Image (tube, rainbow, N blue to C red):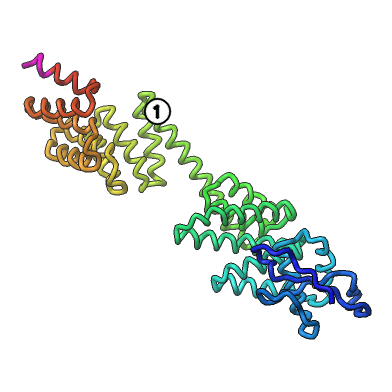
């Protein structure tokens, strides 16, 4: 018997050998003819270079062929192997799909991946072969995310690639568009999410999943509106139109009451138009959701200074300084607070400290000059 071993290299096919059947062994199975001219793959134990024909079974041949489908789908005999498999095991796809799902559910992702790679290349005309493979890659990516492994991105890319190939081959597959939509949603690609969900609703408007898809689309639309409101509010503040900005922010906060940035914008805008009490209220709401932002404490301190709540102002400035001990803006505001309290000596100390950190600080220079002129 002739043995033609696969070239040795560290890959999943390294233990595959190819055998030629003896002349006269041709036979017909359900219209398919086994031809001795075709080399037949067999997987042998690690390090074994010969094969005894008496140990050969259909299962061993099919198993080796499936490995070739998984890892070398452009093999020159791939069409012959496909016909061979379907003749010998006509129910293989259904049975192997069940096995792959069981392996994935038990977190045996390596074997599940190999099974679905095989099926994907064995029966590419089935949308489910793409879907099952993509879902296994997604589960692997999620596992790598939990462990902090850099392989997470690799498997996200693999899932993306399979979804892309599957949808190109089966653009009318509702299942592929449904799961691709959620894949992109998880990765915050809202444009692609909407694209696939819109196609899903067009293809399968009466599908039982349609209401949940429509709900996601509606939420994304609201989010787009909210993002626009938020951006408009920021621009209005920069243009000196704080009252208009506050109206936009209030509209945003009706649907997003826990977004700290929105409370900050409202507090900042209120402070700029000297509405210090409402500014303080908004900024204290901001602290409920964000406790480590220096700018929040600084804006709060300014509002407290203006309504002569100096004890609170000092508390907030100290918290800011504990986060960023060399923040010149905070150091200078300690000086400003002491001016408002009538303690110019202490104010000068803070302004001189600010100049030690930054000799070019114009705010500190101006206040030192002002205090000297009034002395």
Q: Is residue 95 visible?
A: no
- Which quadrant is the C terminus positioned in? top left
In the picture, measured across the screen, residue 264 lies left or right of residue 124, that is: left
**Residue underneath mark 1:** 236
Residue 254 covered by magenta stretch: no
Secondary structure state at the residue bearing disc 1: helix
Residue 373 covered by magenta stretch: yes
The residue sitting at 71% across, 61% down in the picture is: 127
Q: Is residue 163 above or below residue 58?
A: above
The residue sitting at 61% across, 55% down in the picture is: 158
Q: Quadrant of residue 78?
A: bottom right
The foreground one among 359 and 279 is 359
- Residue 310: horizontal and vertical position, in percent? 12, 36
- Residue 370: horizontal and vertical position, in percent? 14, 17
The residue sitting at 75% across, 61% down in the picture is: 73
The foreground one among 212 and 337 is 337
């Amino acid at each position: 018997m002739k043995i033609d071993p696969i070239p040795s290299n560290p890959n999943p096919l390294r233990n595959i050998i190819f055998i030629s059947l003896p002349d006269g062994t041709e036979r017909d199975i359900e219209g398919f003819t086994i031809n001795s001219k075709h080399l037949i793959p067999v997987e042998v134990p690690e390090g074994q270079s010969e094969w005894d024909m008496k140990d050969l079974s259909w299962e061993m041949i099919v198993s080796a062929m499936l490995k070739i489908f998984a890892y070398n789908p452009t093999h020159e005999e791939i069409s012959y192997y496909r016909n061979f498999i379907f003749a010998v095991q006509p129910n293989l796809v259904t049975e192997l799909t069940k096995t792959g799902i069981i392996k994935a559910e038990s977190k045996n992702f390596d074997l599940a991946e190999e099974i679905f790679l095989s099926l994907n290349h064995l029966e590419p005309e089935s949308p489910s072969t793409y879907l099952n493979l993509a879902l296994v890659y997604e589960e692997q990516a999620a596992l790598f995310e939990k462990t902090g492994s850099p392989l997470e991105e690799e498997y996200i890319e693999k899932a993306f690639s399979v979804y892309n190939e599957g949808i190109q081959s089966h653009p009318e597959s509702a299942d592929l568009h449904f799961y691709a939509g959620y894949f992109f949603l998880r990765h915050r690609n809202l444009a692609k999410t909407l694209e696939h969900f819109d196609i899903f609703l067009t293809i399968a408007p009466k599908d039982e999943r349609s209401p949940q898809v429509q709900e996601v689309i509606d939420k994304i639309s609201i989010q787009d509106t909210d993002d626009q409101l938020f951006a408009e509010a920021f621009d209005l503040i920069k243009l000196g139109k704080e009252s208009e900005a506050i109206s936009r922010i209030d509209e945003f906060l009706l649907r997003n009451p826990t977004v700290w940035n929105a409370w900050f914008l409202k507090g900042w805008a209120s402070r700029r138009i000297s509405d210090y009490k409402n500014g303080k209220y908004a900024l204290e709401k901001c602290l409920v959701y964000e406790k480590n932002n220096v700018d929040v404490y600084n804006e709060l301190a300014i509002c407290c200074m203006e309504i002569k709540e100096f004890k609170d102002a000092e508390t907030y400035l100290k918290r800011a300084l504990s986060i960023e001990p060399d923040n010149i803006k905070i150091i200078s505001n300690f000086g400003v607070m002491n001016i408002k309290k009538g303690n110019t000596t202490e104010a000068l100390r803070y302004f001189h400290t600010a100049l030690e950190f930054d000799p070019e600080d114009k705010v500190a220079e101006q206040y030192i000059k002002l205090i000297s002129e009034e002395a």
